Image (tube, rainbow, N blue to C red):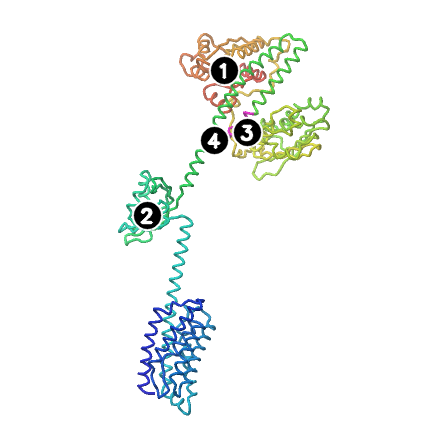
Amino acid sequence: MNLQSFLGLAQNVSLLLAAALLFDVSVVRWKERRPLYAQCLVGALLGSLGLAVMLTPWPFSPGIVFDTRSVLISISGLFFGTLPTVITVATTAMFRYYQGGVGAWTGISVIVASGAIGLLWRHCRKRPLSELTWRDLLLLGLAVHLTMLALMLTLPGDTGWRVLENIALPVLTIYPLGCMLLGMLLVNRLGRLRTEEALRRSEERFSLAMEASRDGLWDWNTVTDEVYYSPGYASMLGYLPSETDMGIDFWLSRLHPEDREAVQRMNSACLENRRDAAEQEFRMQARNGRWVWISSRGRVVERDETGRGLRMVGTHMDITARKLAEQEAVQAKEQAEAANKAKSQFLANMSHELRTPLNGVVGMLQLLRDSSLSQEQDEYAFMALGAVQRLHRLLSDILDISRVEAGKLPLVEEVFQIRPALRQVVGLYQPMAAQAGLHLKLHVDPGVPEAMVGDVLRLQQVIGNLLGNAFKFTATGGISVNVSPLPCGKPGCRRLLFVVEDSGTGIAEETLSALFTPFVQGGDGYQREHQGAGLGLSICRRLVHLMGGEISLESELGSGTTFCFCVALSEAGERVDAPRDSIPATPKSQETMPVPDEAPASLTHSESGEEGDVSKALRILVVEDDRVSGIALTRQLEKLGHGVTLARDGSQALDALREQRPDLVLMDVQMPVMDGLEATGHLRNDPEFAAVSDVPVVALTAYAMESDQERFLAGGMDHCLTKPVNMEKLRGVLDWVRKR
């Protein structure tokens, strides 16, 4: 070993650096799985580089030379694969053979061994090329050049030993280091390329995602007021990407004047570190002049030392379609509410217009029956009253449906005895059962408490409707009502199961699903045989839902029908929350003036027209604009022995009150000149009527809606009687007046 060998190898190192530079700027952009022609091209390039290195060797002796081709070929095998390396090996081997000399075959064997070791290292590696360490590359260099030194022994005679003695240390010092340096250059370059590729793919993925979502990206430099607008942002407003290369003024100029102040206030709060992010909705003007609704999300990503925002980044999303849908939904809701209000108003008007003549018809028929009639005439009058009552029930059913749909049907919670209540409603159908030859049974489980809290009238209405349906379709056998307790999760709550079963004709399976729909009945045959509008079951279902329960039925054509429903009640002394859809309320009339279901014995009268008890006669002012209704009510009261004054409107009523003090005012509500509410207001509040201001006023109203009756009570009236007036309830009112 001498200084000359180190200098010679130093020359090779400089050539290696030049080769490394060439690798860095061109060859390193090699990718695996390139086309065959590309692999051949790279192999030719590497072979040319090998020839360049071999043209400037360090000669040890004639025919024996050293250069860095072993480094180049081993690195080629590791990084570029089989075909480029084979081409490089073939090119350099042929050139070495061309150079000739005693070391030609030894040089060729070193070339082949270097390529083979590089390829072996490539296929045995456990990590990607971009993750190779300097230790991996140093080991490769040592393996290649230890093999090269071993191959020196193939030189003739003692030449190999002389070569090893002089060149071993410089080779093992410089060549493995050169192999490591060249390899690390490629590793670093591959790492950068992989990072660049990942970044490119990420940007492409983000760009595609933004394009697919039709979102726009903006990046605002608050110091220079420069803003980057993504292509999606531009297209959202109808611009080309090149047309949005503007500052913040472009964005501000597009904002809707009504939104500008709120948007700037929100952004300022973010920039001043008073908010973490800005999320807002506003309108921006597109290129064609239309207004686009934008959902904006932004965040400050850079701040100065004082916390002031330097850079703000965010996205814009076009939500115009959603906003239009919301506006359409609001309009549809308003239209539905208006339609529902119109329907309620129509039903209220229909109630008034139908109940007013019905009141006169009922009154006159009752007067007619109280007169001297033959048996045949009395039967005619009785049947006419039945027809009017059926019409009245139909009207009440329609109003009930409307009130439930509007959420205005109140449930009154009161203490009641459940067994007497059930016996009362079932007892109403006993005469019908006896006449039809049917048995009617009621069974209440002993586990059902006696005293309950709930709306007994609505409960009786449901049971009555189900019994009415059962009697319509049952010709033989009988009907049963069974009541049993169910478990309830709330303290003090009682859930009761009601089962109404009949042995009637049953219901076809195809009809079952629609049976609870308004105006649907059990079949065309039933519609021909039985009267009714098909509202009863629909009302039952809605009332049961209001009472916190469910209703269902089982039926088979020809085998009868079973209705089951449950309701949530509470034991007396315990209250449970009313169902969400109900409006708990107790009418003023029930708080101050209980009205018995049956008339007191002292007020009964005979059908022959016998007058009532004159010793308990009252002075009654009847205010009614309908002539027939007024005459009918006057005659009925006179037959009961009361003195009656008839006024046609509120103004005439006030004139009558100026002249006398009656015991009771029966006041119609809707009248010409002055209505009943206005007249009652004068009576209660004007000093002129101070002497008679405490006279009880009972509304005679054709308005059956609960809200109307509450309004009448709030206007100073003491009670409401719905037209057509029920005589039993009227007698109860008269009894209450006597007891005052």
Q: Residue furthest left?
A: 224
Instruction: Give the spatial CA distance, label 3 vs label 4.
Output: 31 Å
Instruction: Check disc 2 and report its element: helix, strand or loop.
Output: helix
Few, some or many residues within 10 Å of mark 4 (<14, 14–19, 20+)? few
123 relative position to 502: left or right? left
Instruction: Check disc 4 and report its element: helix, strand or loop.
Output: helix
Name the mark nearer the viewer: 4 or 2: 4
Mark 2 and mark 3 in contact (Cβ < 8 Å)? Answer: no
As shown in the figure, which amino acid type bears the numbered disc 3? Answer: Glu
Instruction: Give the spatial CA distance, label 4 vs label 1.
Output: 32 Å
Q: Which residues are magenta?
A: 398-411
* Chain-order first, disc 1 or disc 3: 3
562 relative position to 155: left or right? right
Q: Which residue is mark 2?
A: 270
Name the mark nearer the viewer: 3 or 2: 2
Tell me what residue is drawn at x 35 percent, y 46 percent. 278
Few, some or many residues within 10 Å of mark 2 (<14, 14–19, 20+)? many
User: Residue 647, how many percent across, how many down?
Assistant: 48, 10
**709 shown above or below 67:** above
Numbered label attached to residue 336: 4
Q: Is residue 493 visible?
A: yes
Name the mark nearer the viewer: 3 or 4: 4
* Chain-order first, disc 4 or disc 2: 2
User: Residue 71, how many percent across, how many down?
Assistant: 38, 77
Q: Which residue is mark 1?
A: 668
Instruction: Give the spatial CA distance, label 1 vs label 2.
Output: 66 Å
Q: Is residue 143 visible?
A: no
Quarter placement of the N terminus? bottom left
Q: Which residue is mark 3?
A: 413
* Chain-order first, disc 4 or disc 1: 4
State yes or no: residue 410 in magenta: yes
As shown in the figure, which amino acid type bears the numbered disc 2? Answer: Cys
